[in-house]
Amino acid sequence: MTRITFDHVTKSYDSVQPLKDVSFSIEPGEFFVLVGPSGCGKSTLLRMIAGLESITSGTLSFDNTPMNNVEPRQRDVGMVFQNYALYPHLTVFENLAFPLSIRKESRETITKRVHEIAEVLNLTSLLDRRPKQLSGGQRQRLSIARAVLKDAPVLILDEATSALDNESERWVQAALEQLMKHRTTLVIAHRLSTVISADRILVMSDGRIVESGRHDALMASGGLYARLYSAGETSFQR
């Protein structure tokens, strides 16, 4: 498992700063949830860890190794985003096989593991289709299945179930709970049950960290987190 450290990290676009001098660490195996108002910098922070956003200043490290200039495919990070991040020109089978082929697994191993995870997530009948032929729930299950096959020590989930219908959400949530075990996991969540169960909650506002702690302690402090929680579940959404 991986320790992730932000050391005075800032992201700037001309005069706009979605992330401002952020410093904190995520311990190996920690289940870590980000909350805060819309536009506070949560997704920017996760995209930096994945390598999908560059860092203007400061240092992002994995186990004391700077990652600022490391390409996304060279980071051992599994990602499940709202927009699925699938390869549109590849079939479901090929999307699932991709992380295994990067690791140079044998053809027999790839075929076996793809069919195993497809059965678990009810994708077996869809293996010849392309992402555009799938429903939203099917695409999200495909994203999760690919993250499972990558088997990375760091997992990033950005509102992974917020746009799904109830039936699809049950499939996805069950898969996520298995996937999160024994990994350093970072989540932007809209489910209060997910937020409450976090090892640590990072509260963001206007690109900065304003609070950090477990649910009970943050509620007792009466700060921004307590106000968001009291306002209801939708306040945790981006």
Image (spheres, rainbow, N blue to C red):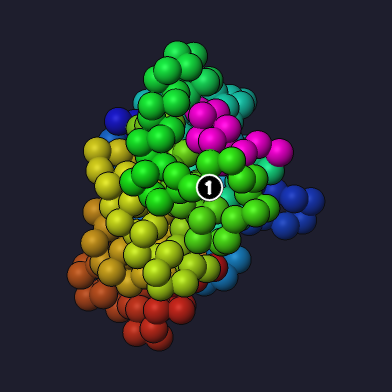
Question: Residue sitting at 52 percent across and 20 percent down?
Answer: 101
Is 21 in front, or is 96?
96
| Lateral position of residue 227 relative to residue 198, left or right | right
Q: Considering the image in quadrants, where does the C terminus appear?
A: bottom right
**Residue 92 falls inside the magenta stretch:** yes
The percent coordinates of residue 136 (x first, y second) are 56, 61
Residue in the picture at 20% in, 70% down: 216
Image x and y of residue 170, in percent: 35, 64
Asked if residue 27 can be seen in this view, the reply is: no
Residue type beneath disc 1:
Leu
* Residue 184 or residue 17, whichever sits in front: 184
| Position in image of residue 41 (x %, y %) | 56, 58
User: Which residue shows up at 51% across the image and 56% down it?
Assistant: 138
> Image check: 145 left or right of 27?
right
As drawn, 101 above or below 161 = above
* Quadrant assignment, res 87: top right
Determine the residue positioned at 60% across, 66% down.
Answer: 39
* Quadrant (top left, top right, bottom left, bottom right) of the N terminus: top left
SS at circle 1: helix
Q: Which residues are magenta?
A: 89-99
Q: Given the current orientation, which residue lies at the most extreme front position? A: 125
**Looking at the image, can residue 177 be seen?**
yes
**Which residue is the site of mark 1?**
126
